[in-house]
Image (cartoon, rainbow, N blue to C red):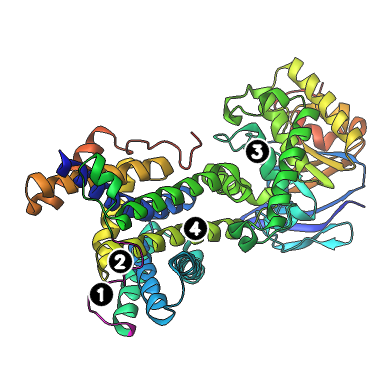
Amino acid sequence: MDTVIQQLFNAAQLGAVYALIALGYSMVYGIIRLINFAHGDIFMLGGFIGLLLTTHLGWLPFYLMMPLAMLLTALAGVAIERVAYRRLRHAQRMSVVITTLGVGIFLENLVRLTVGPETRQLPARLPTAPVLWLQNTLGAFVTWDKLLIILLSLALMAILWLVINKTLVGTAMRAVADNKDVVPLMGVNLNLIIAATFAIGSALAAAGGIFYGQAYSIDPYMGIDLGWKAFIAAVIGGIGSIEGAVLGSFLLAGVEVLTVAYLSSNLKNGIAFGLLILLLLVWPSGIMGKPMLKKV
Amino acid sequence: MALRIEGLVKAFGGLTAVSGLNLDLGDRDIQGIIGPNGAGKTTVFNLITGIYQPDRGRLRLGEQELTGLAPDAIARAGIARTFQNIRLFAHMTVLDNITMALHGRAGYSLWEAVLRTGNYRRQETRLRVESRDHLARFGLADRQQELAGSLPYGEQRRLEIARALATGPKVLLLDEPAAGMNPKEVEELILLIRQVHRDFPLAILLIEHQMPVVLELCAHIQVLDFGQTIAAGAPQDVTRNPLVIEAYLGEAEAPA
């Protein structure tokens, strides 16, 4: 019993990281129908910015380092949109797909050349002691960093929900998703709203990268595997839907972790991708795949 | 003068959709543009709002040059429009539709919004209050939490006009507002446009197929055919013009 609970916490931690990435895929797709295949590499970049800040500005406490890394990654995301994607907004879909893949390869090699190809551990900045309360009540061995990563991720998702549903920028983002062509006629600068979406998506991915580096390790190519998984999670949930991205992420992580724990680690990807195919046969547009960024 | 258009030209490939249009719209005027289908009327609106860029000609709003500006800048300068086929944010609430329109006038930057500064939060609260007041003026206060796309047709039309007005325009462009309405709804629409003209300090430019609406509202109309003005003046005179009758009125239905 206790191991099941431990596995569920593992799944929640992995699902939280997937969700932080999947949200960016889903938001960008929701507003401009662009699948940003470089988004997994933004996640990687966020992790490395976190690593550089931790090693060079070691005195920065975690609660300052993390927002700073998110801000810097957000700037990178905005810059990529400005330089590489904006002028392709009316281009053929294939040109855009190729460009996003190219940006991803660029980011991977940029980090490989500047920081190095090695796998690295982000210095532990969160407490790693076990949560005694969980050990005493449920008999589950769960460390504080794992619990904090799950809780902080959920908090970020809650903030995102509030931003989208309760603020002006969020209203504008939903309006772009709803009827992009009418937004400029409201006197609202469409480019600003699209930039804000890239900023928010990249900042969330950076949080995911830092959490992932705390929980596991980082390397310049980690965005490929994790990015695809998060993309699958977003598609399963219904790409364009915020709630769907979160749901799909926890679902996928749950299936993966439980497969590894109780079946075989070799089957992990087979089952994850098989699940994608099965779910899409039943729900072609994903579990919550209705009009994007829809208010619930 | 609110809106001044000089020698506006727009061609698509070999087809000249608008060919040398001139128009002077006074500060408080209600003017109409009529003409058969494909005469270039909606193209004129798309040129004024910056959706298309003109090949030649100038657009000015008061003293401000609009030629070449982006659609959002033109909207902020004071030109708002509605569409023949209503274009609301259909999956958003009625209130959110209005808030979006007020949004363009809110002064804050991207980083203020992302970091949620005090200035941004004050703007946000103010806009929510303004949105509610604005809806009340159009009898839509009870509907504010409903999805715009779920309203009955007449109310969608009213919301679209209310949303256009929320941007604070000096000129309101109405593209066939009576399209798809029955005679009773048309009557209500005429009253609504009169009320808008009385309550808001603006000029109205109207494209319309239904002659009763034009005759009822406009002191001055301009008739387009194949992108060219074939007649202009008071509606009563224009509708007797043989050119107009040939181009437009003769082919489908007689004027009311």
* Residues rendered magenta in the picture: A114-128
Identity, as a three-letter code, of the amino acid under mark 3: Asn
Nearest the eye: A263 or A130: A130
Which dot marks residue A200? 4
The residue labelled by disc 2 is A213
> Image quadrant of residue A37?
bottom left
Between marks 2 and 4 in the image, the one whose residue lies nearer the viewer: 2
Between marks 1 and 3 in the image, the one whose residue lies nearer the viewer: 1
Residue at image coords 60%, 48%:
A172
- Could you give the CA–CA distance between mark 1 and mark 4, rounded to whole angstroms? 26 Å
User: Do callouts 1 and 4 point to residues on the same chain?
Assistant: yes
Residue B188, image x, y percentages: 79, 20
Residue at image coords 78%, 60%:
B66
- Which chain letter matches label 1? A
Residue A24, image x, y percentages: 42, 55
Position above or below: A225 against B3: below
Main SS class of the magenta portion in the image: loop
Residue B120, image x, y percentages: 69, 55
Identity, as a three-letter code, of the amino acid under mark 2: Gly
The C terminus of chain B appears in which quarter of the rendering?
top right
Between marks 1 and 4 in the image, the one whose residue lies nearer the viewer: 1
Label 1 with label 2: CB-CB less than 8 Å = yes
